[in-house]
Image (cartoon, grey):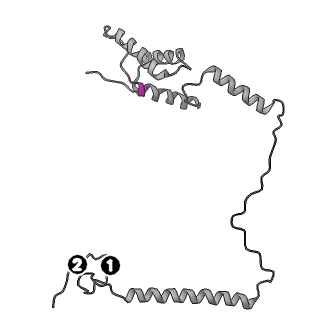
Amino acid sequence: RVFVLDHTRWTPQMKEAIDGLLQKHHGEKDILKVVDQEYAQIVHQAATDPNSMFHPTAKRHISGYVKHVAKLLNTSSAMNTSPEKLLDTQELWHSLTEGQPASVRVTTIQPDVFNPPAPASATPITAESLEKIVEGILQKQSQQSEQQQQKKKQTKRCLSCGQPKSRYETSGSSVHFFF
C-alpha cells in the first residue's frame, strides 16, 4: 500500500527536494509533469533506505503546493513565465510609460441612427393635459382589475365531459361527478 502525501503533510526534506526541482525547471513547458517525474525517481531511489523521509506525492499536490507558496508570497502562480517573457513585459511597460510618444491615425465614424427619438413637443405640459393623462392611466388600471375579477369568477370546465373543474387550479382534483 502506497500513501500519497499532499503538500500540507510533506516533510522538510520533501519540500527542499521539490523546491529545488521547481527552481531547476522554472520556465519550462509542462514543469509540473517534469518535476513529478524527477521526484518519483528520487523516491524510487530512496525506497531502499528505511529511514528515508521522501514519500510519494502526486502532480496535483505539487500544483497545490505551488499555488500555496504563490499565495504566501502574494504573487501569481503562473508556471510558465520565463525570464524572457518577463523581460518582454518589462520592456513593453517601459515603452508605454516612458518611451517615445507614438502617433496613431484616428478615423471618426458617425453612429447610425436606427430608432430616431420622437421630436420633443414644443408645447409645455399644462395642468389640464396632465389630468387627462392621469385619468387615462386610472381608467386602464380599473379595466384591468375588472378583467382579472371576471377571470377569477369563471370556472374552467373539463375538456372531455364539460363538468366544472375545481376552483383551486393546483388542487390536482380530477374527480368527476356522475348524476
Residue drawn at 73 percent across, 91 percent down: 128
Which kind of residue does numbered mark 2 sit on? Ser
Q: Which mark is residue 174?
A: 2
Provide the residue designation for mark 1.
169
Overall secondary structure of the magenta stretch? helix
Residue 105 position within the rendered picture, expressed as x and y whole percent measured from the top left: 82, 41
| Relative side of 143 to 49, left or right | right
Residue 96 position within the rendered picture, expressed as x and y whole percent measured from the top left: 77, 33
Residue drawn at 50 percent across, 26 percent down: 66
Q: Name the element at disc 1.
A: loop
Alpha-carbon span between mark 2 and mark 1: 11 Å
The magenta segment: 57-61
The quadrant of the rendering that contains the C terminus is bottom left
Which kind of residue does numbered mark 1 sit on? Glu
Q: Quadrant of residue 38?
A: top left
Decide which of tag 2 and tag 1 comes sooner along the chain.
Answer: 1
Viewer-side residue, 61 vs 73? 61
The quadrant of the rendering that contains the N terminus is top left
Residue 30 counted in the magenta span:
no
Do the residues bearing badges 2 and 1 touch, measured as CB atoms within 8 Å?
Answer: no
Q: Residue pushed farthest left?
A: 179
Q: How many residues crowd around disc 1 within 10 Å: few (fewer than 14), some, or many (20 or more)?
A: few
User: In this picture, is 39 found above or below 153?
Assistant: above
Residue drawn at 27 percent across, 81 percent down: 159
Q: Which mark is residue 68?
A: none
